[in-house]
Image (cartoon, grey):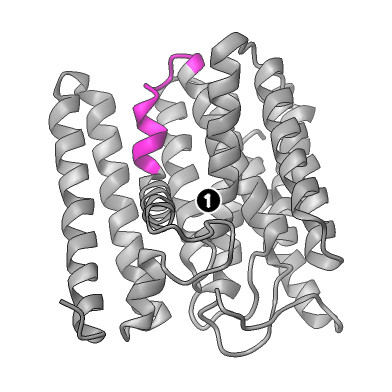
């Protein structure tokens, strides 16, 4: 019976997005200076993902398997509601960030974090919440990261005999997989903030929860979600060092440059999936052989360095820069 949670998440997300796409007057994502798409596209797909996760959470609650992750679930759906309002009507940036900080701090406090650990954890969760939104800019990218990333968390939790965390993570991955049917290039619907914001929050908060429960080391979720973490963090650092306004919309993420250099959204998505799977394999290698953590970190860091250097080189060549 408990195994119905992921299946119900998949089915509800599929049905919800299908229903939404049959409706008219949906909130649209219009091309702008940050985007890579050329045509207005509905940005309400995240509602389908969260609807699937909500039904799965109901199954788990009915089975008595939601106690340890309840603070995470409540905070994630609070953020989903606020983000949906932002998708539909638009909210001030200050209000959005305040909601992110309150949700992160409240959730981690309920999970038992205090003092400087609570402060550091809150900052990490808020950063992951927002960087997931930054990286949701190409067809199939954020949905693929959710399917692979939360799938990896589910497998690790299952191996660690943490059934609640395993089933809930599997439900998120299943809902993301259903969403990918509509979002894989060429996308018919985008995730929007109602999907990307709570997914980023869930990636960080579930990663912290698993580390506190001893299911994985803190490096495990960082490696699993590193394709998003590294791109967004390096891009932000470079923009800051160049004196650019880091809060303004832009198209300087490495994944964006790949498309601007001529790759299709489909080619980018498939290459990103290969990188995500490779990092997930390294994360499980780290989990199984913690004594080799230094070599795993060296290999992953070298991989990103080579990828970024190759993209930078092509970028300079395309603009005839030295």
Question: Residue 253 appears at what percent x and percent y?
Answer: 41, 64
Q: Residue at x 47, y 61 (%)?
A: 244
Residue nearest the viewer, comparing 123 with 286:
123
Q: Residue at x 71, y 19 (%)?
A: 67
* Label 1 residue SS: helix
Count every numbered label the image shows and give the total. Answer: 1
The residue under label 1 is 131
19 sits to left or right of 225: right
Residue 108 lies, with reference to residue 114, above or below; the image says below
Residue nearest the viewer, comparing 98 with 301:
98
Could you tell me which quadrant the C terminus lies in? bottom left
Rendered image quadrant of residue 129: top right
Q: Is residue 103 magenta?
A: no
Residue interval drawn in magenta: 212-224
Q: Residue at x 82, y 50 (%)?
A: 82
37 sits to left or right of 251: right
Question: Residue 2 appears at what percent x and percent y?
Answer: 65, 33
Question: Residue 193 appears at what percent x and percent y?
Answer: 69, 59
Rendered image quadrant of residue 313: bottom left
192 sits to left or right of 276: right
| Viewer can see residue 170 | no
Q: Are there few (<14), some (14-19), or many (20+) residues within 10 Å of tag 1? A: many
Question: Residue 277 appears at what percent x and percent y?
Answer: 31, 52
Residue 93 lies, with reference to residue 262, above or below; the image says above
Q: Residue at x 78, y 64 (%)?
A: 87
């Amino acid at each position: 019976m408990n195994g119905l949670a992921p299946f119900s998440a998949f089915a509800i997300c599929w049905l919800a997005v299908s229903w939404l796409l049959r409706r008219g007057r949906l909130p649209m994502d219009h091309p702008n200076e940050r985007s890579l798409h050329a045509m207005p596209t509905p940005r309400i797909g995240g509602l389908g993902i969260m609807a699937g996760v909500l039904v799965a959470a109901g199954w788990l609650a009915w089975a008595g398997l939601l106690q340890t992750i309840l603070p995470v679930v409540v905070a994630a759906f609070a953020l989903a509601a606020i983000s949906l309002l932002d998708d539909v009507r638009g909210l001030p940036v200050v209000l959005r960030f305040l909601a992110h900080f309150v949700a992160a701090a409240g959730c981690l406090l309920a999970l038992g974090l205090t003092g400087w650990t609570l402060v550091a954890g809150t900052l990490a969760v808020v950063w992951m919440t927002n960087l997931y939104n930054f990286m949701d800019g190409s067809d199939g990218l954020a949905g693929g990261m959710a399917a692979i990333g939360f799938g990896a968390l589910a497998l690790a939790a299952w191996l660690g005999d943490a059934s609640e965390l395993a089933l809930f993570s599997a439900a998120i991955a299943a809902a993301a997989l259903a969403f990918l049917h509509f979002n894989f290039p060429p996308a018919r619907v985008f995730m929007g903030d109602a999907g990307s914001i709570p997914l980023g929050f869930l990636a960080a908060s579930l990663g912290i929860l698993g580390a506190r429960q001893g299911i994985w080391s803190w490096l495990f979720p960082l490696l699993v979600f590193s394709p998003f973490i590294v791109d967004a963090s390096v891009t932000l650092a470079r923009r800051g060092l160049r004196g650019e306004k880091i809060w303004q919309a832009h198209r300087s993420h490495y994944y964006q440059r790949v498309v601007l250099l001529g790759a299709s959204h489909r080619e980018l998505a498939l290459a990103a999936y290969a990188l995500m799977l490779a990092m997930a394999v390294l994360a499980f290698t780290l989990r199984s052989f913690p004594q080799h953590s230094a070599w795993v970190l060296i290999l992953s860091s070298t991989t990103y360095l080579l990828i970024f250097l190759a993209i930078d080189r092509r970028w300079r060549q395309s603009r005839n820069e030295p």
